[in-house]
Amino acid sequence: MGNGHSAVRQLRYLPAVGAAYGVEVLDFAALRSMDTQRRRTQPQRPDFHVFALIGSGTGGHEADFHHYRLREGSAVWIRPGMVHRWSDIDACDGPLILFRPGFLSGFTASEAGTPVCWPLDQQRLSLALLAADHLGREHGTAVHTPRLASPALLSHLLAALILRALPDTPPSTGVASPGCRATDVFRAYRATVEERFTEWHHVADYARALGYDVRTLTRATRAATGTGAKTFLDQRILLEGKRLLAHTDLPVTGCARRLGFRDVGNFTTFFRRQAGLPPAAWRAAYGTPGTRGV
């Protein structure tokens, strides 16, 4: 053990033949029919977005160590890089939309402030399902009649669907609207954190690279997510640490190195402070088979 083997299946965006528009529209029945080996119930990490609506039925879903009960009216948004699994969708019905990062523009703040799973009331669910049906019909037309294909139209229809389904009250306060300066600052900060969080553990590093001061990054991040820039960065490092501990066989020292900590003691102190448990205890409690006890 300890060679970095992952128990998580990496999923790449591979659209069906004739559907290379950056978005693909399926449903839960299609997912079940394509996945006869039930690999959907095992941890997986897509490099694309998955947006789903539960039109009927009940089930279960897990994403980054949180379990969600699915029922009629549930909306699910899985972002690229999340480790998730469909623990129980045998009785679920509804649309399932896959789309590439960047297919939608201007959603950075909304995405950051939206949970993985939230409920829709009956009226909003009906309207969201109508929007998904419209998107599905246009997508089907694009696949079967390429001369009528319009990626821009598909993008706008997807945006309309997500706008219809977004929660009324985001968990953060003062969320910046798309296009304003704070949103642009946060978008740049978030993208750089994704690129550099295993190297840079201080907000000042990002401020220097982006040409802003720390206070500007803090205000923009709080407007978008409800937390400051330092907390946002620490939570990103912590999440990756949890993923490595739970889903790979790397020893704790290897996890520390992978995340840019100079020694395991610093990593253990950071992890315990953020998660309330030392790394080995976290792995023992949450690790997938084959990683516990490492």
Image (spheres, rainbow, N blue to C red):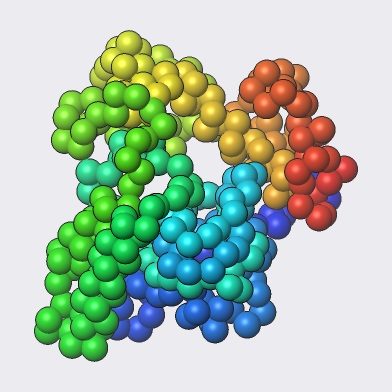
Quadrant that contains the C terminus:
top right
**Residue 146 visible:** yes
Q: Residue at x 76, y 52 (%)?
A: 288
Q: Residue extending furthest front?
A: 122
x and y percentages locating residue 256 in the rendered image? 68, 31
Is residue 23 in sight in this rendering? Answer: no
254 or 114: nearer the viewer: 114
216 w.r.t. 17: above or below: above
Side (left or right) of 239 relative to 135:
right
Left-right relation of 63 to 252: left
In front of the other: 6 or 77? 77
- Asked if residue 30 lies left or right of residue 37, the reply is left
Asked where in the image residue 48 lies, by quadrant, the reply is bottom left
Q: Which quadrant of the view contains residue 207?
A: top left
Q: Where residue 182 appears, x then y in whole percent?
A: 23, 25
Indicate whether 181 appears above or below 105. above
How many tags in the picture?
0
**Residue drawn at (75%, 19%) of the image:** 265
* Residue appearing at x 42%, y 62% in the figure: 53
Rendered location of residue 292, percent (x, y): 83, 46
Q: Position of residue 20 (x, y in %)?
A: 29, 74
Q: Is residue 223 above or below residue 112?
A: above
Q: Residue at x 66, y 38 (%)?
A: 242
Q: Residue furthest bottom?
A: 144
